[in-house]
Image (cartoon, rainbow, N blue to C red):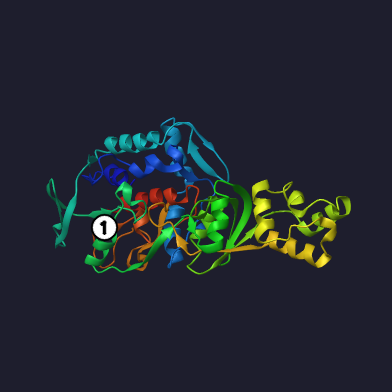
Amino acid sequence: MCAIEAGNRGRRVLVLDHANKAGKKILISGGGRCNFTNLYATPDDFQSQNKPFCVSALSRYIPQDFISLVEKHRIPYHEKKLGQLFCDGSAQEIVRMLLDEAAAAGVTVRLSCQVTGIRREGEVLGFLVETDLGAVAAGSLAVATGGLSIPKMGATGFAYTVARQFGLDVTPTRPALVPLTASGRNLEFCRNLAGVSIPCIARCNGASFTENLLFTHKGISGPAVLQVSSHWREGQQLHIDLLPGLDPLTHLQAQQAARPKAELRTILSALLPRSFSEAMCGTYLPNRAMGQLSHQELAAVGHTLKDWTISCDGTEGYRTAEVTLGGVDSTGLSSKTLEAIKAPGLFFIGEAVDVTGPLGGYNFQWAWASGYCAGQYV
């Protein structure tokens, strides 16, 4: 996006990519269909230690702007849920669209090119970028190399190294939108339910997400957990509402009157997956006949179902994380141009910057918006 906009301004633009294919992370996104934006993305949805920073770019390049580009290239798409837009076909269509736009803007894309060093050549000459294919001189340099997420795709901390080299700070980084891991009794509970998915509301540190929870052999995952993982920290509990929109105590009291001989797990199996109901009654809840449960016990069951807590020890790490939380400290960048205040001509955009959105096309929208805005000045 940055290269396209710079090229459209008449700039001579070269994109250096160490990967052997352009847009590798785009290609694997959304199960290969690329969740390319979210209809409802606003600056308020994003996390950062400097929250006002992203407002300018996200306000100047909105989801409809990217949708218009997709429609210009006649790429069929659909809304899956919650404003999440996916290609009907393949993520390759988005990569091809961007490459075609870049070519039309006169942009040169050089793949399988490793950058080995960058040095400042002075205010007039700009930068000398050393690569394994030779050195390149440039008046401006935009770093759009992402964060640490999914190293098997080639992700590295390159952007952070460059930022520090030129005097910028980097806020602490951690895997985000990532499955959480458990241990001990919690891990055993999750392993026995691996593959079971449950609609829920997951809460942590004031953040709340209504999505599905998925049990895994390592702990918990699914959209609800991925979302809340960006707000979770080691040692904290997740609070899970297993029955969104339902008052379980009222339901249980009605079932107790109607079916006093039925076991609790049988009653819960009508509301939740049978295997989960049986596991809950074997671990967290009393499995007795409904008629044998006191009002206090029914109330306790209802409370557990509305606020089931599970402690997690860690995450699956950058290997499976959708994005990196943290990054280049945006207080050192212009919110209008994305240019480094201490290093004129040097720009940082996309995931490399300390701006992180939730799951569902938000982080792509930040990439498009920050690239578009920097491209007006680079």
Q: How many discs appear?
A: 1
x 59%, y 50%: residue: 211
Identify the residue at image location x=82%, y=56%: 290
Q: Is residue 336 visible?
A: yes
Amino acid type shown at disc 1 = Phe
**Image height of 97 relative to 334, above or below:** above
* Residue 79 on image: x %, y %: 55, 39
Question: Looking at this rendering, what residue extends furthest in the right direction?
Answer: 257
Task: Residue 355: tell me if it is visible.
Answer: no
Q: Is residue 340 left or right of residue 188?
A: left
| Residue 90: x %, y % from top left | 42, 33
- Compare residues 140 and 23 and report the one nearer the observer: 23
Quick one: SS at disc 1? helix
Q: 283 or 159: nearer the eye?
A: 283
Q: Position of residue 180 (x, y in %)?
A: 49, 58
Q: Find residue 344 and report its horizontal and vertical position in percent.
A: 24, 62
- As displayed, is residue 26 above or below residue 217? above
Q: Quadrant of the N terminus?
A: top left
x 38%, y 53%: residue: 319
Q: Is residue 24 left or right of residue 80?
A: left
- Residue tagged by mark 1? 158
Residue situated in front as seen by the camera: 210 or 241: 241
Residue count near mark 1 (Cα–Cα under 10 Å), binned few <14, some 14–19, many ≥20: some
